[in-house]
Image: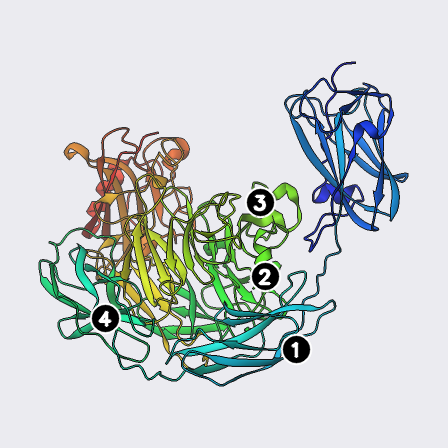
Amino acid sequence: MAPRPPWRVVLAGTAVAALGLTALSPVSAFAADTDYESENAVISQGVVESNHAGYSGTGFVNFDNVAGSYVEYSVNAAQAGTHTLTFRYANGTADNRPVKLVVDGGDKGTVDFPGTGAWTTWKTATATVQLTAGVNKVRTTATTANGGPNADKLTDTFVAPTDGEPPTAPANLKASNILPTAATFTWTAATDNVGVVRYEVNRGGNILKTVDGKTTTATVDNLTPNTAYDISVGAYDAAGNPSQQSNVVTFTTPPSDDTTPPTVPGNLRSTGVTANSVSLAWNASTDNGGTVAGYDVFQGATKVATTTSLGTTVTNLNPNTSYTFTVKARDPDGNSSAASNAVTARTSAPGGAGGIPEYDKDIAKVDLGWSVDFLPNGNALVTERDRFEVVLVTPSGQKTTLGKVPGAVGTNGEGGLLGLAISPNWASDHAIYLYHTASGDNRIVRMTYDGSTLSSTSTPVLTGIAKNRYHNGGRIKFGPDGKLYATVGDAKNSDNAQNKSSLNGKILRLNPDGSAPSDNPFYATGGNARYVWSYGHRNPQGLAWGSRGQLWAAEFGESSQDELNLIQKGGNFGWPSCEGTQGSCSGFIAPKKTWPTSQAGPSGLEIVNDWIYIAGVTGEQMFATQINSAGTGIGTVSTLFSGRWGRLRSVTKSPDGGLWLTSTNNDKNGGTPSVLDNVIVRLKFPGGSTPGDFKLTSSAFADNATIPDKYTCAGDGTAGQDPSPPLGWGASTGAKAYAIVFADVANSGNKLHWAIWDVPAATKSLPEGLGAGYTVPNQGGAKQKAMGSGANAQKFFGPCPGGSSHPYTFTLYALNTATVPGLSSSSTMAQIETAIKGASTANVVLRGKSSAAA
């Protein structure tokens, strides 16, 4: 007999359903496995052999090469119900050899068994079936003349029934005996269909104490004096199902009798300067009470930063100027140390736009501005978490409430109206996408906004995301691939993060219509796994892409470490086994940066010119760092605006070349939606524009910096048809239209790559990735032309110098006419530039460099 291929039972997702089998779902327990060696089974038209190494027992079964040969096992099930049958096999050919699976005479369908590469390579495959208590006949029968595989053994595993019903929420939570470092909590017991096994006492989604399911009181003795707390309790059953949270109790612990200040912070030093900033660091203080509450940084006698970190960056300074700083430590009782040593640092000379932004101006006050995205005209849409409203905000600060999102509800905590993403094709489809909490779940919905009216109804895009008071995730963004990405928290059930059939504890990727892209890593698994892009997340929120198209994400930790992650397709980031770099982290993807959870709370994330900006909630500060040249990590992290606006929630690049930063103070326990007490502020970059300046900028790169590869021939390895970078500018007085000419100006030359003209006067920005065509799609009649021929003459033509770093310019022209005369689709690039210059009243230049090559 010739060697035969082994079985490979592939019974996941839709394949399982098609075969009439029961798909394996998350389980709470497994009975002991039982092995059945194939050589001890009933064999028809097959022989027991031992000529290929690696088998278990005394040998394996080699099927005859005929249809109808079979191996039948007698599986003695101790319990009736769902069982997983695991077949160990080998297949040294490339043949696919179908085998029929029959249990007690019941046909369970035909499955395929591809090769394993060698007869000594043994693999396993599983099928999930229903067995009765006692002996069950499990027969595997070859269906083709090739016969079956080399069968080593079958392993039976009983799958305990899954309890999908969570406990009710604990009720009537009360706090008593509140001391400077302790408090006692009591509550009414939750109920469950099986039984409550534990309660968790939480503060802001972090566990303070756990007690068993029979205990309804707990004393927490690790509190901090003179500190505000919001406490709730959650119940769990044996299957790990979490209840919704109890009512919330709020209180402030009394001060202690401590009058001793912390020790003086040591070794205050400058760790870096720019033209507008000085970065500082110092050594930690200690306190007799064990807790240093924070550090206050002074510029002379003026307090300029408050932080829990051991460093900060002071911004909005003048170039070529010396500044002197000191720092003091304070404890929770308000005792402050003496000042540290003084350090004097001098800012550098003015330069191009750098990576450290500075405050520009207040834009508007809102309730809880959770997410911001910009329309093509430069206006922004903002979600207010607890008012469930979408607000239109102009760069000058004018606000218009467009309406409420239907069905949005709060959770008395971290749920509500969260993420917002405007369709990349908004000019034609008018679609906006929102992530919000509903009565039974978290969900992503689509609404329409046509520039004046927000629709009164929403269309569900993805539903069934588990919700809780805590850990709802909620950030959504369109990626460079046109897909919609969403961050989803574990909903206080950490097991969700490793369970691919759950949408929680994941970063999801979906098509705009809500379907799952077929190139997602677990698409073939079926069900919810089709949407999973990465998993093993606790409560991720920030999302953004660098110039290489890599996705970066920020994530809240439990009690030790917050994370910045470089996301990998199909990657497992470790939660709950691993938090940051602590715990059982072997085999999981490590973060690129961690912070103590008291210093960060990373929420919104943005990337500009490969600088990462993160809004910190818990630490009440923003972080800035640059992606390294290899794209594999980051450089030094600067801590900005420490304590200035409180809890920072989102940071978003604006079309005019700045950043919008939002705060969400008073966001616990349902917030204060009747009070507009949070801010949107605009940050600017040194040398960058402010609204109203006739200056051309790009949120993708700074003036005279490197143009990211995605906008060049290096992006796809082919010259031409590159995505255009985002561009923004301030108005030129009296301009009737605008034009931009992109040119390679190496060696005092002027090689014209691309031009766009007849851009309407009301337009102050161009989005990334303009569509192809002489008449530019969705740009009010603007025309474009590029070097090259065919399609390459109808779309942005990016840099492709093929060697040394060439200088390029984007020249913005203010035009005295709405339509440049004398031009057509057959005009040459030189004719177009000449005509534009002839109609120009003013021009400004944005410079860029590139060494891209196809």
Do labels 2 and 3 touch, CB within 8 Å? no
- For marks 1 and 3, give the CA distance: 44 Å
Secondary-structure class at tag 4: loop
**In this figure, which residue is indicated by the disc labeled 3?**
517
Q: Nearer the viewer, mark 1 or mark 3?
A: 1
Amino acid at dot 2: Asn
Rendered position, 12 above or below 576? above
Can residue 538 be seen in the rendering of this structure? yes
**In this figure, which residue is indicated by the disc labeled 1?**
189
Q: Earlier in the sequence, mark 1 or mark 3?
A: 1
Can residue 669 be seen in the rendering of this structure? no
Q: Nearer the viewer, mark 2 or mark 3?
A: 2
**In this figure, which residue is indicated by the disc labeled 2?**
493
Q: Position of residue 592 (x, y in %)?
A: 38, 48
- Where the N terminus falls, by quadrant? top right
Amino acid at dot 3: Pro
Secondary-structure class at tag 1: loop
Amino acid at dot 1: Ala
Residue 263 circle label? 4
The crowd level at tag 4 (other Cα within 10 Å; few <14, some 14-19, many 20+) is many
